[in-house]
């Protein structure tokens, strides 16, 4: 395996799909040009039936692909409502019943597309060695863990602290190759304004809406001498409720952070349908991200 610096892998990052996916997207990625595809989750939008339809289309991809479940994936509409509502703790827990089955069904529909949560994959796209560490599934952002009962029963995660421990153990299981984090929501620590890359734009109070466990995992990796290339996520749509634009990417302490959530990712431009994704170019020691509308 040749790992010289001129060699590069191309990774397509697809932001929150929210049903904006069709066979032309499949055809585009199957035409070549990408070594790996990363879906940041939220294939569905409120109904599981239509999310399954997107998943069955994704299974026609002939490029290796991974997907983390978002807060719309494996949750029915009432469950999602309870997760968003304040003080609905008991409802939230009772709606978690059946979530494991719903997630299994989604994984089956996805076929070879790897539905991963709290996981690690050692890959070498185009010969570039890479550890992909996949974060907490179904994240809704903020300080509270969404789908707590499901996370506890399925992953033994019952608090932000135990989620940090779980992510840190995934980092410990990585070899010397650089790490790329894949998550649904991005990490905290990157801004507390409504239009920060993962800032809260739906409450009167502007605040950091990033995931604290993910921020802790990235700094744990770095403090252990790991090379963290990038963290890619979505969830907080780039266009805020007030109509402002979040940064699509930023670099902090040598890590590239990408928010791929351009929603909707299908748009008409001058009468032509355009489709969004982010192209990552990864070399043995570096990464760049470029927004593409194709
Ligand atoms: Fe989301």
Image (tube, rainbow, N blue to C red):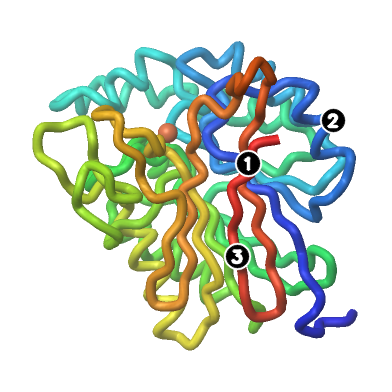
Asked if residue 207 is positioned above or below residue 56 in the image, the reply reads below
Q: Is residue 236 above or below residue 48?
A: below
Q: Residue at x 81, y 85 (%)?
A: 4
Provide residue 279's location: percent of width, then percent of height. Answer: 66, 52
**Location of residue 148 by image quarter:** top left
| Helix, strand or loop for disc 2 | helix
**In the image: residue 22, left or right of residue 67:** right
Residue 136, x across and y down, in percent: 45, 49
Q: Secondary structure at mark 3?
A: strand
- Which residue, given by chain and number where applicable, does mark 2 sit on? 27
Residue depicted at x 31% and y 42%: 141
Tell which circle, 1 or 3, labels the residue nearer the N-terminal end: 1
Q: Residue 107: name its quadrant.
A: top right
Q: How many marks?
A: 3
Q: Give the labeled residue for mark 1.
A: 277
Q: Nearer the viewer, mark 2 or mark 3?
A: 3
Mark 3 crowdedness (10 Å alpha carbons): few <14, some 14-19, many ≥20: some
Q: Nearer the viewer, residue 190 or 240?
A: 240
For the question of whether residue 75 can be seen, the reply is: yes
Residue 8, horizontal then vertical, whole percent: 77, 70
The residue identified by callout 3 is 288
Q: Please report contact status of discs 2 and 3: CB closer than 8 Å, yes or no.
A: no
Pointer 3 residue Cβ closer than 8 Å to ligand 1: no
Residue 55 % position (x, y): 69, 26
Dot 2 or dot 1, earlier in sequence: 2
Determine the quadrant in which ligand 1 lies.
top left
Element type at mark 1: strand
Upstream in sequence: badge 2 or badge 3? 2
| Quadrant of the frame with the N terminus | bottom right
User: Horizontal placement of 214 versus 200: left or right?
Assistant: right
Quarter of the image where the C terminus is located: top right
């Amino acid at each position: 395996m040749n790992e010289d610096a001129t060699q590069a892998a191309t990774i397509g990052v697809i932001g929150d799909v929210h049903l904006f996916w069709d066979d032309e997207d499949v055809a585009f990625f199957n035409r070549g040009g990408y070594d790996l595809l990363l879906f940041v989750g939220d294939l569905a939008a409120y109904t599981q039936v239509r999310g399954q339809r997107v998943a069955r289309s994704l299974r026609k991809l002939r490029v290796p692909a991974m997907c983390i479940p978002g807060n719309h994936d494996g949750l029915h509409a009432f469950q999602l409502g309870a997760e968003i509502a304040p003080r609905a703790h008991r409802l939230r827990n009772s709606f978690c019943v059946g979530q494991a089955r719903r997630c299994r069904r989604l994984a089956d529909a996805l076929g070879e597309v790897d539905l991963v949560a709290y996981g690690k994959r050692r890959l070498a796209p185009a010969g570039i060695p890479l550890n992909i560490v996949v974060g907490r599934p179904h994240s809704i952002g903020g300080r509270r863990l969404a789908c707590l009962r499901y996370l506890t029963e399925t992953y033994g995660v019952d608090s932000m602290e135990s989620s940090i421990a779980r992510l840190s153990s995934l980092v410990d299981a990585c070899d010397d190759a650089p790490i790329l984090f894949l998550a649904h929501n991005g990490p905290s620590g990157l801004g507390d304004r409504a239009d920060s890359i993962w800032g809260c734009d739906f409450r009167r109070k502007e605040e950091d809406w990033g995931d604290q466990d993910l921020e802790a995992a990235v700094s744990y990796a770095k403090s252990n001498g790991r090379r963290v290339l990038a963290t890619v996520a979505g969830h907080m749509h780039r266009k805020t409720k007030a109509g402002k634009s979040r940064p699509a990417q930023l670099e902090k302490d040598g890590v590239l952070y990408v928010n791929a959530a351009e929603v909707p990712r299908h748009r008409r431009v001058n009468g032509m349908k355009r489709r969004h994704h982010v192209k990552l170019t990864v070399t043995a020691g570096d990464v760049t991200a470029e927004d593409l509308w194709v």
